[in-house]
Amino acid sequence: MANARRTALVTGASRGIGRAIALGLATRGYDVAINDTARQATVLEGVAKEIEALGARALPVHADVSSRSDVAAMVAEVEVAFGHIDAVVNNAGILIAGTVEALDEAHWDSVMDVNAKGTFLVVQAVLPGMRKRRYGRIVNIASIGGKHGAPEQAHYSASKAAVMGFTRVLAQEVGVDGITANCVCPGIILTDMGRVNLDDPTVRKTWHDKTALRRIGEPEDVVGTVAFFASDDSAFVTGQSLNVDGGIVLS
Ligand SMILES: NC(=O)c1ccc[n+]([C@@H]2O[C@H](COP(=O)([O-])OP(=O)(O)OC[C@H]3O[C@@H](n4cnc5c(N)ncnc54)[C@H](O)[C@@H]3O)[C@@H](O)[C@H]2O)c1
């Protein structure tokens, strides 16, 4: 059973979608541990102050999610500080554009390491605590790219498809202990990463016109669905991958 005061860990939370999720969870009554790499330390401190201004507790933790030792230290630090982790949001991700023929092996590996392996490592580290309490909410940020793909993003799409496949099996393995695992698949969202798709006005217009709601998403557009999967409103929903894309991928 969860305690009255909820706690969450959000990875890649210094900017973009992760920052919006962290602030959104703080608004909804969570104390929030916010992760990013050490090079984002100053920006992460700024997000911590924003969370505290909302009356919630903030804990900035530096870790590279693709490093098992960093992740173990991060989760241990959060569990000591907060006592437990109710919800984890695996949001940290990278995108390096390149056609299949131009892509070098190092780029393939780094995108897989952060997006897919990072999600696995964080989940593996939080599971003992969640199983012990027989409660947990795991929310993995995938992408519509993992469903329909986009040119020059083969490795990114593969990594996000991996996150969805991983989540479907995870849900089956952990449900017995009251833990749910779901994916949120953002569409085209205006962030530093999103600009890869949006800097070119022609590409931007194409995405705009492909979107049923005829607008590019803002980071805040992703928050409500993540909060739903992190909460008990979704207590009987697990193993799902829900598009939050304004209506690009209709399924
Ligand atoms: N922006 C979009 O259009 C879009 C669309 C679909 C999915 N997504 C996904 O949403 C998530 C957030 O993306 P965003 O658009 O906010 O991107 P962003 O680049 O603005 O933010 C990503 C954050 O992750 C952090 N990060 C990167 N590598 C890390 C690592 N190894 N360890 C810890 N932190 C790390 C970065 O420092 C950054 O703060 C990503 O998983 C991304 O793939 C984004």
Image (cartoon, rainbow, N blue to C red):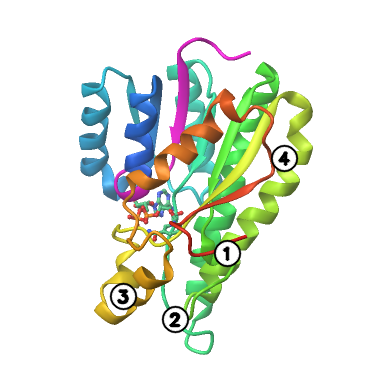
Which dot, 4 or 3, sits closer to the camera?
Answer: 3
Residue at the disc numbered 2: 98
Image quarter for residue 137?
Answer: top right
- Tell me the kind of residue under disc 1: Gly
- Tell me the kind of residue under disc 2: Gly
The reply to whether residue 13 is in sight is no
Residue at the disc numbered 3: 205
Start-end of magenta stretch: 1-17
Q: Residue at x 33, y 49 (%)?
A: 219
Which dot, 2 or 4, sits closer to the camera?
Answer: 4
**Residue 228 spot, x, y in % from top left:** 51, 33
Q: CA distance from mark 2 to mark 4?
A: 32 Å
Q: Earlier in the sequence, mark 1 or mark 3?
A: 1
Membership of 171 in magenta stretch: no
Q: Which mark is residue 127?
A: none
- Tell me the kind of residue under disc 4: Ala
**Residue 76 spot, x, y in % from top left:** 51, 27
Q: Are marks 2 and 1 in contact (CB under 8 Å)?
A: no
Residue at the disc numbered 1: 146
Residue at the disc numbered 4: 171
Which element type, helix, strand or loop, lies under badge 2?
Answer: loop
Q: Residues within 10 Å of mark 2 (few under 14, many from 20)?
A: some
Q: CA distance from mark 1 to mark 4?
A: 18 Å
Q: Earlier in the sequence, mark 2 or mark 4?
A: 2
Q: Are marks 2 and 3 in contact (CB under 8 Å)?
A: no
